[in-house]
Amino acid sequence: MAGNGRLHTIHPLESRWALEPTPPPLRTLIIAPNCDPAHAPPTHLHIRHARGDHCLPIRPYRLLLIQLQAMLRRYDPDILLTGWGDTWLFPLLLEAAQAEGFHDFNPNRDPSRRVLRRDANSYFTYGQVVYRGAQAHLFGRWHIDQRNAMMFGDYGLDGVLEQARVTGLPVQEVARKSPGAGITAMQMQTALREGVLVPYQKQQTEGFKSARDLIRADRGGLVYQPTVGLHHGVAEIDFVSMYPSIMVHFNVSPETIGVPGEHRRAIPELGLSIDPSREGLVPQTLRPLLARRIAIKQQLAGLNRRDCRYAALKARADALKWLLVVCFGYLGYKNARFGRIESHEAVTAYGREALLRAKEAAEDLGYTVLHMYVDGLWVQRP
C-alpha cells in the first residue's frame, strides 16, 4: 500500500492449491420465510445466527426494515444465507423501503453501494430448459440464496468456497452458476497465462466424417451387460476420475488432436493422432485440479465419518468432482470456447480401451467379470 492510499500490489498469503487452506472466519446470518412464497404469502421471517434465533413478523414493513437493519449492524454478518432471497425476499425489502421512504435501509456493508440486481434468464442445455431466477448481489458481504444456487444442495458452502478458490470466480457468482462456468474461467486463465487468445465465440467446427467413421467414433463409454441373476462374493473396481485422468495422461485437448508431427501417437479406433510433445490447454488446466481431488480423497479415506473434518472435506471433493466431470462434457459442447468433438471422442475411445484392458487383467487373475459400466467393473471369484 502506497502512502497516498492507493493499492499497488497484492501478495497472497496462501496458494490457491493449498490442500489445507485456512478457513475464513465467517459470520453467517440465515434468513428464511415461514413458507414457500410460491405457495402462500409468508407471514414471518425466521432468522438464525450464532447467538440464537429470531422470528420477525413481515408486516408492518417499516418495523421489519428497522429490525433487519439493526440486526445487520449488531451482528455484522459476512454471509447472508437466505431461502428465496433472490426471487422474493430482497425484491420485497427493497420495494418496501422505497414505498415507506426508509432510505437508510441498506443490507450492504459498503454504505456507498446499493444492492446489485440481475434479471432472471433461461437457457437450453442437454435437451431441457433451465430457469435461473433473478439475483441480488451485495457489496462488502456475500448473499447466497440456497434456493437459487445451482449446486448448493450437493456440496454446500464449503464446496462453493472451494470452487471459488480454484476457479477465481467471485463467491456470489460461483454459487449461482453451473460448474461449466467455473471450468471455462479456469481454461481462460490458463490461456491468458500462456499468451493464447481467448475466442469471443467458438469458431472451430467438426471435421468431415463418413457415416462409418461417425458410427465408429461417436460411441461413448463402454457398457457390458450384466449377467442376470443373484451373485455372491462380488467386488466393484472403480477408476478414480477416469476421464479427467485420461485427458491429463494422454494430453487430450482441442489443439493436440489431428496435428502433424514426428511425436504423434495413434488414438484407438478413431484413425486420428494426438501430439504428446507439448502439454495442451485442457490438461494443463486439469492437472492441479485432479491432483487436488485425489489428495483430498486420500485424506477422506483415512478419516472416520464421524470426524468433524469429514463433512467439509467431502463437500470440497464433490465440488472438485463436478468441475472435472463438466470439463469432459465441455470438450464436446458446441458452444464451449475450448471444445472440439474429436477430443471428446478421443477421451471415450481411451476409456473403452482402458476398461477392456482392465477386464483382461481381471480375467488373467482368475476373476469373472459380471458387469462393466464406463469406468467401473464388477468382478467375482470364489
Image (cartoon, helix red, strand yellow):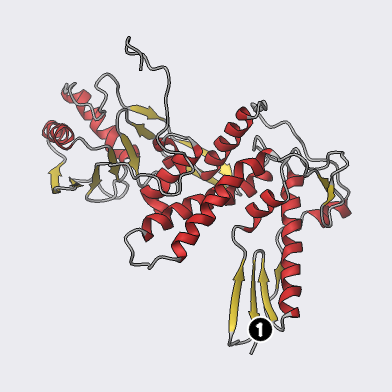
| Residue drawn at 24 percent across, 45 percent down | 30
In the image, what residue occupies the spot 77% across and 41% down?
256
Left or right: residue 345 compared with residue 162: right
Residue 105 position (above or below residue 36): above
Crowding near pointer 1: few (<14 within 10 Å), some, many (20+)? few
Q: Kindly state the secondary structure of the residue where label 1 is placed.
A: loop
- Is residue 300 visible to the viewer in this orientation of the structure? yes
How many numbered marks, from 0 up? Answer: 1
Badge 1 amino acid: Val
Q: For the N terminus, give its image quadrant.
A: top left
- 352 left or right of 170 in image: right
Residue drawn at (46%, 65%), measured in percent from left and top?
301
Q: Quadrant of the C terminus?
A: bottom right
Which percent across, then down, holds residue 141? 30, 33
250, above or below 221, in the image: above
Who is closer to the viewer here, 263 or 226? 263
Question: x, y (%) of residue 204?
Answer: 75, 34
Q: Which quarter of the picture shows residue 263?
A: top right
Q: Nearer the viewer, residue 150 or 278?
A: 278
Find the residue positioned furthest to the bottom.
382
> Which residue corresponds to mark 1?
228
Q: Is residue 31 left or right of residue 330?
A: left
Q: Where is residue 178? Give x, y as percent.
A: 50, 43
Residue lying farthest top? 4
At which x and y percent is residue 38? 32, 47
Mark yes or no: residue 177 visible.
Answer: no
